[in-house]
Image: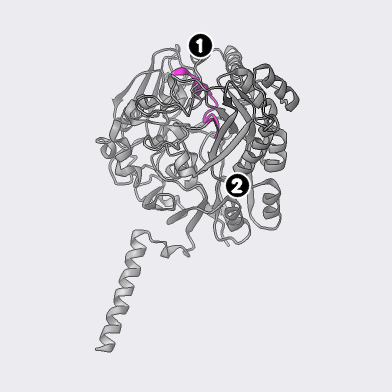
Amino acid sequence: MFKIRNIFLFLLACCSIFLFASCGSTQQSNSANVLKMLYWQAPTILNPHLSAGYKDAEASRITLEPLASYDAKGVLIPFLAAEIPSKQRGTVSADGKSVTWRLKKGIKWSDGQPFSAKDVLFTYEFIKNPQSGSSSLNYYQGIEKVEAIDDYTVKVTFTNPNPAWSNSFVGPEGMILPQHIYANYVGKKAHQAPANIMPIGTGPYRVVQFKPGDLVIYQANPYYRDFKKLAFSRIELKGGGDPASAARAVMQTHEADFAYNLQVENSLLQDITNSGKGQLLVTPGPLVERVLFNQSDPNHSTNEGEKSNLKFKHPFLSDPTVRKAIALAIDRQTIAKQLYGITGQATNNFLVAPGEFVSKNNPLEYNPTKAKQLLEQAGWHDSNGYGIRERKGQKMQMIFQSSANPLRQKSQEIIKANLGSIGIGVELKSIDASVFFSSDPSNSDTVEHFYADMQMFTMGNSSPQPNAYFKTYTCGNIPQKANNWSGENYSRYCNNQYDQLWQKASQELQIEKRKELFIALNDMLIQNNILVPLVRRADVVAISPRLSGVEISPWERDTWKIANWKFNKK
């Protein structure tokens, strides 16, 4: 009986190991063709159109694809598209009011169903529905209609001439969703879709296991068009930890092959790099770490309990003189040099790439003395000598929030000290990135709700055509309860003059005139101190000595060409 029982247990264990291997368990993690990726900011949803966080789009991009994307040189390359539209081919209209996409034939979703133009049309319907609360909506504004001409042809017609026709269905915001999976999850049901957790895509790898905030496991997609060229049978994307530990795991201990978004203090990052083996990829691009001012009052609620509502102006941040004083008091050069080093450069522009659209009209200025003078002129005085200015019983006391990571918290500390030196009290708040960037309409700690006075994070344009990026600050893009907290104008800034200028820029076909308009939009934001740009932040990743084929584009997520990644032969 004892021997029989042992044999039974042995067979049971073998079966268990086999089942774990078949289901994508981490038991396979020592396999020679398993790619190990570390994302200390862990993904929490795998539908990029329902998240404001790059981390979620990074994980989604492994399994979902757009029609096309921009490479590092700003050249469009096709993914699901058969070719790039152009006037020469007759697929971009001469008047700029339509573009026709021809799709690749024979593409299948990872469940074996055929991909067609109907999926592209459906993705547009999903995103444009205001109840979906899509974070990609800016990239689909100005569209009059999208038509599936046939199974492999999509025509997009714009209301007005649109020089940025390539913003829609392209790049990170252009990932296509399968109609047959999401058909019953549009609008208010969008966040309930099972595919938000277990997506079906056309990309090189498919998700077989997902623990939000912790682990994503992928396997090679057998229906992928270039399946035979895929180097990995399995990918393990592990979340948690911190950026310094992730860098060490790749550069020093080689426990992982790729580490994402290494927001590590300059001196520590240099030590890790110098004492390790591997490659640190530092890619300057359009990303800007910035401080946003809340133009509305986060401490005043409507009868329905909604804070930061447009009806109630902020007691002092709605004053441009106060905002200018704060901008003058923040020491951006110290933040850039001490904390970022080779991975960041101090800036005073909203748009920092591409170069032809960058303004030269906004030099950096750090002047605490002038900042104090402006606050005095605006009527804010430290009348009791306690170090905090006040006016008519209102204290200059603020809550300053950001997502949790060591580099960002050190930046917050510097800014708190800067503002304290001019008589502004600051209480710091850090929020887990999985919550801060979740775009969850039911969570009051997201960037969209902005129930604080100032908040800090990184954002940038996802395309060399920055129309959608400048649309951020238009009046209709303000997130609020009425639109299910969709939109990226978190500051609640509304200026009809800005909106009119943006409308003009979005329709201008002549490149020189567009340059002038984009620079004017940038300068309007900066010179009115609607935000405080801090650092032009490079994309920083680490790759192990055995990994090659990694190609980073500032206009895409780092995983955009993961189909080409491979391990070097020993």
Question: Which residues lie in the magenta part?
Answer: 453-475
Q: Nearer the viewer, residue 234 or 217?
A: 217
Total count of labels:
2
User: Label 1 is placed on what type of residue?
Assistant: Lys
Q: Is residue 204 left or right of residue 257?
A: left
Q: Which residue is mark 1?
A: 504
**Residue depicted at 64% across the width and 43% down the height:** 410
Residue 129 image offset from top left, x and y in percent: 32, 26
Q: State whether residue 466 appears in this view.
A: yes
User: Label 2 is placed on what type of residue?
Assistant: Pro
Q: Which residue is mark 2?
A: 406
Look at discs 1 and 2 and give the one toward the viewer: 2
Q: Is residue 322 above or below residue 341?
A: above
Q: Is residue 212 above or below residue 514?
A: below
* Residue 464 covered by magenta stretch: yes
Here the colouring is: one colour
Mark 1 surroundings: few (<14), some (14-19) or many (≥20) residues within 10 A: some
